[in-house]
């Protein structure tokens, strides 16, 4: 999918607002496409830009909450493998339709699962929405295992690029899976980490946007 892919396997568990801010800041760096794996410092939920705060609170049950910049539903975090993909506007993949990017990412994800012995499939038809809980509502190109949705994602496209935020609700996804997923997405892998300037900008953005009540309760 990408000729080059920068991979950041972020080992430090972080609060939701900082995780969201890091994704937004990394999108703005306009580097080669970036794949970031990340962790949460406490059981949390993230919820889509258009989801109401009240609906999110009903599902949160005292877990930390953060509103995403991307769309989609309500996603539990802590036991999942969370990742994001940032595609700059100058990369060839940016010209693809968002739904094509969604499908190709999940095809690579499914192939990586197969490499570690997990059989999955992509959803082919839309089901009726039953709630704002992301994993209760499989959509086309989501990943299912034994008819249960295990991977979904949300996107936001801007003039700077496309942000794809995904969650895999599956245990035992170790380094083998992460390496396979990266390899299936990028022809050339560039291992990287979060730099000081990016972290400083993300901490400021988290404090002024993602951690504020104005952002959290905007709907």
Image (spheres, rainbow, N blue to C red):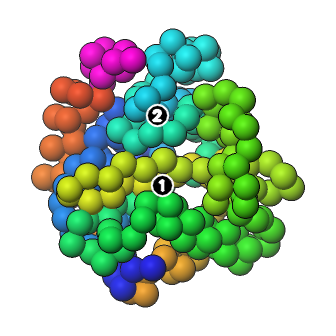
Q: Is residue 71 visible?
A: yes
Dot 1: few (<14), some (14–19), or many (≥20) neighbours within 10 Å?
many
Which residue: 48% across, 55% down?
A: 83
Instruction: State the count of labels.
Output: 2
N-terminal of the pair, mark 2 or mark 1, is: 2
* Quarter occupied by the N terminus: bottom left
Dot 2: few (<14), some (14–19), or many (≥20) neighbours within 10 Å?
many
- Magenta stretch in the rendered image: 211-219
* Quarter occupied by the C terminus: top left
Q: Position of residue 76 (x, y in %)?
A: 60, 34
Q: Secondary structure at mark 2?
A: loop
Residue 48: give its label. 2
Q: Secondary structure at mark 1?
A: strand
Which residue: 56% across, 32% down?
A: 74
Q: Position of residue 187 (x, y in %)?
A: 43, 87
* Magenta-drawn stretch contains 213: yes
Closer to the eye: label 2 or 1: 2
Q: Position of residue 168 (x, y in %)?
A: 62, 52
- The answer to the question of whether label 2 and label 1 lie on touching residues, with beta carbons closer than 8 A, is no
Q: Position of residue 181 (x, y in %)?
A: 55, 72
The front one of 190 and 140 is 140
Label 1 belongs to which residue? 83
The front one of 216 and 131 is 131
The front one of 209 and 178 is 209
- In the image, is residue 114 above or below residue 160? below
């Amino acid at each position: 999918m990408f000729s080059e892919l920068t991979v950041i396997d972020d080992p430090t568990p972080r609060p939701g607002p900082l995780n969201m801010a890091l994704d937004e800041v990394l999108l703005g760096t306009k580097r080669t496409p970036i794949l970031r794996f990340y962790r949460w410092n406490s059981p949390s939920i993230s919820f889509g830009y258009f989801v109401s705060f009240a609906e999110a609170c009903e599902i949160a049950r005292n877990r930390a909450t953060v509103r995403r910049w991307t769309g989609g539903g309500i996603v539990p975090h802590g036991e999942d493998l969370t990742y994001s993909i940032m595609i700059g506007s100058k990369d060839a993949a940016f010209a693809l339709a968002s739904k094509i990017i969604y499908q190709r990412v999940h095809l690579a994800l499914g192939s990586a699962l197969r490499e570690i012995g997990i059989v999955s499939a992509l959803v082919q038809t839309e089901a009726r929405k039953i709630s704002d809980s992301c994993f209760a509502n499989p959509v086309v190109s989501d990943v299912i295992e034994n008819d249960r949705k295990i991977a979904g994602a949300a996107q936001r496209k801007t003039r700077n690029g496309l942000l794809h935020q995904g969650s895999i609700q599956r245990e035992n996804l170790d380094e083998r899976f992460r390496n396979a997923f990266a390899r299936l997405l990028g022809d050339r892998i560039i291992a990287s980490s979060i730099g000081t300037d990016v972290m400083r900008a993300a901490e400021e953005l988290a404090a002024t946007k993602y951690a504020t009540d104005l952002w959290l309760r905007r709907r």
